[in-house]
Image: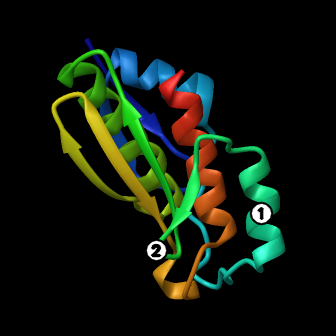
Amino acid sequence: MRVVVRFGNSRWVRLGIGIAIACTLLLCPLSVRAADVTALTEAEIQQGLDGLPAWAIADDKLHRDFEFESFIEAFGWMSSVAIAAEAMGHHPEWFNVYNRVSVDLTTHDAGGISSLDIELAERMDALAR
């Protein structure tokens, strides 16, 4: 079964029913963000990391390695994150090998870590539960 979901003011997206339910419960309504986001201060980054214990700073980016039971679970999680990221207008740098996904988050337009990175990390954690 396939459904069509609308994310805030964004475009319509055709999804499998499981992903649509996850979006409805965890992510929606989502809206596209303005491009005028600024980099966080060191103190703001540390405050954001307080709520993200599995994340660390590596090469001036938020970094986390996720591990899942299988490739299918890893890919399914990446698909769910992709929907959230697209709706936010903010996309991760990531690398997948079998059941592992390595993620780096930074906001290139802001020249560093921004509130969008903290928010996307929180959503990634929520979807990984």
**Label 1 CA crowd tier, 10 Å (few <14, some 14–19, many 20+):** some
Q: Which amino acid lies under the numbered mark 1 shown in the image of this protein?
A: Gln
Secondary structure category for the residue under label 1: helix
Query: At x 58% / y 49%, what residue is drawn?
Result: 55
Q: Give the position of the C terminus as an image quadrant.
A: top right
Query: At x 24% / y 28%, what residue is drawn?
Result: 99
Residue matched to label 1 = 46
Query: At x 51% / y 29%, what residue is drawn?
Result: 127
Distance between the alpha carbons at the discs numbered 2 and 1:
15 Å
Give the numbered dot on residue 59: 2
Q: Position of residue 38 (x, y in %)?
A: 68, 84
| 10 lies above or below 17 | below
Examine the rendering and report whether any part of residue 21 can be seen: yes
Residue closer to the observer: 47 or 108: 47
Q: Position of residue 70 (x, y in %)?
A: 23, 18
Q: Position of residue 105 (x, y in %)?
A: 48, 63
